[in-house]
Image (tube, grey):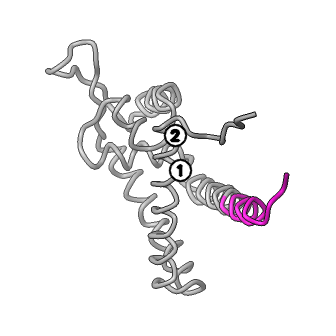
Amino acid sequence: MDTDKARRFRRFSRSLIAAQAVLLKHGDAMTRQVGQSSARWRVLLRISEGDQTVAVIARSSQLTRQAVQRVANELVAEGCLAFSPDDADKRMQRVSLTAKGNKVLAQLERNFAAWANRTVELFPLEKLEKLARQLDAVTEVLAADLARGVTVEQDND
């Protein structure tokens, strides 16, 4: 049964997914100029916020642990990251930026700033901030449903 509420939520879902897809494609195009990808950029940025482990980066970036490990390994091979033992847990390794990694991230951030400034000229900052707050609220509602195991209503028939 298709209700008006379901149709409206479907339209919202499609718009959100389409926006995410274009945002990621735009990010990949921007990062490609520096020989990177959006996923690599997210990992570099998370690490720049403080030495991290792969698991912590995965949790904070909505990437799988395996994806973060693969990206981290590639960035280590390129000389952008370095692994070091985690003093608190010898089974874990911390990941940190190297001088080359800092240079790559700085270029990515300069590209991002130019992209952001251009986008804000087309879509006012106040509207972006309001939309971000609204999306945060939707995210909280959906995350709470998942945490409770609620994904569909059960028929009582």
Relative to 1, 77 lies left or right: left
Name the disc covering residue 142, or none: 1
The correct choice, above or below, for 27 with respect to 76 in the image is below
Mark 1: give few (<14), some (14-19) or many (20+) Cα within 10 Å.
Answer: some
In depth, the one of 106 and 138 nearer the eye is 138
In depth, the one of 119 and 136 nearer the eye is 136
The correct choice, above or below, for 27 with respect to 91 in the image is below
Give how far across and how far down residue 37 sits, in percent: 57, 47
Is residue 12 magenta-colored? yes
The correct choice, above or below, for 52 with respect to 92 in the image is below
Q: Residue furthest top?
A: 91
Residue at 49%, 54% in the rendered image: 141
Give how far across and how far down residue 56 sits, in percent: 34, 34
Q: Residue furthest left?
A: 87
Residue at 48%, 46% in the rendered image: 143
**Element class at badge 2:** helix
Name the disc covering residue 146, or none: 2
Residue at 46%, 85% in the rendered image: 126
Q: Main secondary structure of the magenta part?
A: helix
Is label 2 in contact with label 1 (beta carbons under 8 Å)?
Answer: yes
Q: Residue furthest front?
A: 157
Give how far across and how far down residue 73 sits, in percent: 45, 26
- Residues in magenta? 1-16
In depth, the one of 147 and 50 nearer the eye is 147
Specify the quadrant of the image occupied by residue 133.
bottom left
Give how far across and how far down residue 31 sits, in percent: 55, 54
Residue at 56%, 39% in the rendered image: 150
The correct choice, above or below, for 148 with respect to 48 in the image is above
**Element class at badge 1:** helix
Q: What residue type is disc 1 on? A: Leu
Q: What residue type is disc 2 on? A: Leu
Is residue 23 magenta-colored? no
